[in-house]
Amino acid sequence: MMQVVSLPGDPGLGPEVARYLGVVHSTFFSKRFPDGEVYLRLPEPVSGDRVLLVQSMYPNQNDRVVELLLALDVLERYGNEVILISPYLAYSRQDKEFLPGEAISLRSLVRALSSTGLSTLVTVDAHSPSAIREFLGGRRYINVVPVEVFAEALKTYRFRELTVVAPDQGAAERARALAEKIGCNYVVVRKSRDRVTGEVKHSLEPLEGLKGVAVVFDDIVSTGGTVASIANFLAARGVEVVLAVSHALLVGNALEKLAKSGVREIYSIPTVPVRVPGIRYLELVPYLVKLLKEEGIV
């Protein structure tokens, strides 16, 4: 027997996954004490021995992490096998020591999760899947990269001169996969980091000569600075810029910044509870459930 259980950070995937699987869905009750501490309780007992627990970790990352650790402890005490679906995993970009003495935040988070009764971790287009796998210490890990979802949405551009742009080397494999699925070329923007200051610089020369439509494909867009630089460069040369991003955090004035830079459309996946007006959100659940079935999880 299986049951789907949502935490407060669930972006709406839990009920949909339960509906597709034809299983029970329930939700943890959460509140904050006057001193800011988190209270968590599962009102109804879990009916199955296997639980799909859904928790995204944005916004209010620290609260989401504490809720998750408390929930994992509850389910472990009752003997449930827990498969955590975390569409957006917080702290994933601090996956190594860039400057001496820095905390490797992703390592700390993942090691905390692996110290619980967690059996399997499922993420959506994680920033550093290889690091997560290493830090999990042998527990099962699945990273869902929704290339097919984006390719289907972008099929209207197939008959135009189209190029997929990776904003840095870390996004190259993602861009290559999307380009192959669409049937077009891709290019990679070169990125360098100053070892002393940590400042990141991008070299846009690989974008010279692009025509038609450029699809900038990335995992996370937060402030939008990198994408805006790329869009400014391309728009000034008559290229139409489209952004495809798995996690559209778009903090502060990021959306306005992207619009001014020349980004015409933004496609994203509903991996966080925040919905930004003007973004085309694509349906993830059918693709996610299909992969979970292929992996023998459900």
Image (spheres, rainbow, N blue to C red):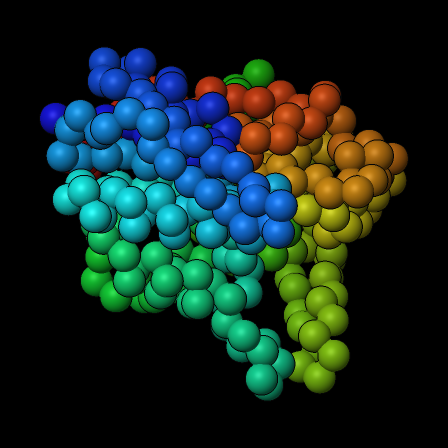
Rendered view: 169 above or below 268? below
Q: Is residue 258 left or right of residue 195?
A: right
In this view of the protein, can residue 40 be seen by the observer? yes
What residue is shown at x 84% (from left), y 34% (from top)?
256
Rendered view: 232 above or below 20? below
How many marks the image carries: the answer is 0
Q: Residue furthest front?
A: 34
45, 149: nearer the viewer: 45
Q: Point out residue 10 in the picture as x, y percentages from the top left corner.
A: 46, 32
Q: Quadrant of the N terminus?
A: top left
59, 267: nearer the viewer: 59
Rendered view: 160 above or below 178? above
What residue is shown at x 30% (from left), y 50% (from top)?
73
Location of residue 202 by image quarter: bottom right
Q: Is residue 19 left or right of residue 189?
A: left
26, 181: nearer the viewer: 26
Q: Quadrant of the C terminus?
A: top left
Q: Point out residue 285 in the picture as x, y percentages from the top left corner.
A: 38, 23
What residue is shown at x 65% (from left), y 64% (from top)?
191
In this view of the protein, can residue 58 be seen by the observer? no
Q: Point out residue 6 in the picture as x, y percentages from the top left corner.
A: 39, 30
Q: Is residue 233 left or right of residue 202?
A: right
What residue is shown at x 62% (from left), y 21% (from top)?
280
285, 206: nearer the viewer: 285
Location of residue 130 by image quarter: bottom left
Q: Point out residue 38 in the picture as x, y percentages from the top left corner.
A: 51, 46
Location of residue 16 by image quarter: top left
